[in-house]
Image: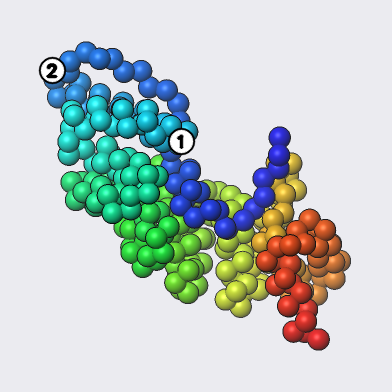
Amino acid sequence: MPKKTLSRRFAAVATLLGALFITGCVTTTDSRFSREADRQKAVESYVQLATAYIGQGNLERARHHLDRALELAPDSSAALAAQGLIYNSDGEPELAERSFQQAISNDSGYTRARVYYGAFLYSQGRMEESRDQFRAASRDTEYSDRASIFYNLGMTQERLGQLDDAIVSYRRASELSRGDARSLLSLSRVMADSGDMAGAARYYDRLLLIIQRNQGLQHSPESLLTGIRIARYLGDGNQESSMVLQLKNKYPESVEYQQYKALISNDK
């Protein structure tokens, strides 16, 4: 099994949406749904199947199930939001946006539509709008993956140069996820960027413990450069030398290694 690396550059919308897809199988029937409860259950099943197929990249199967869902409930926010994902995958951003907006208009409390729309806006470079959608989504205390919402909110805030706000969001993501590596890395890096090196060191130490305990994780260029900056601040020459060696040997062509060389050049 290949090891995972830690990085905040997670292929824009692909990674933002990746964790949102629902996997698994749902059994449906072709029987007529005479009662409202049955109709709603059928719509939910079709949407769940469609979303799973979108996650697998099987858009044709996804379209088939979404068509069935929309036949039963043309105003279904869940179906319209999933339809937006398909339009986006098809390179139809205007249609995708229209679907996301309609989903939210039909049910402003359907948080998943805001999450999809926020990711879409992020991929379009519309950071302020993306931030606003993630901020609205973060208020839903019943949403199953609020940690990812706060992480995405932190990303948009960071891109907007709002580092203090990004720190708050990344910290909340870390709390909700019980300290996952991705949130800890972003939090420690942004704290270092904002000048709070002591605070960055505390969270980075927690990140190091996770990497040491999980054989499936290894340092990325980003995590190594962050560690180097913190080690230099703390005067920990051994830690700095070890991480510099890893960065040079494993990622000699990385942007982070070029940044490290610029860092030491400025110190001379």
Answer yes or no: is residue 155 visible: yes
Q: Which quadrant holds residue 58? A: top left
Q: Which quadrant holds residue 195? A: bottom right
Q: Which of the image's four quarters has the N terminus?
A: top right
Q: Find residue 165 and report its horizontal and vertical position in percent.
A: 45, 69
Q: Secondary structure at mark 2?
A: loop
Task: Tell me: residue 110, above or below residue 266.
Answer: above
| Residue type, numbered disc 1 | Gly
Residue under the image location 41 percent in, 64 percent down: 125
Residue picked out by circle 1: 57
Q: Secondary structure at mark 1?
A: loop
Q: Residues within 10 Å of mark 2 (few under 14, many from 20)?
A: few
| Residue type, numbered disc 2 | Ser
Residue picked out by circle 2: 34
- In front: 179, or 107? 107
Q: Find residue 130 and report its horizontal and vertical position in percent.
A: 37, 61
Q: Find residue 10 and report its horizontal and vertical position in percent.
A: 55, 53
| Apparent side of residue 10 relative to residue 250 in the rendered image (left or right) | left
Q: Which mark is residue 5?
A: none
Residue most extreme to the front: 91
Residue under the image location 48 percent in, 43 percent down: 19
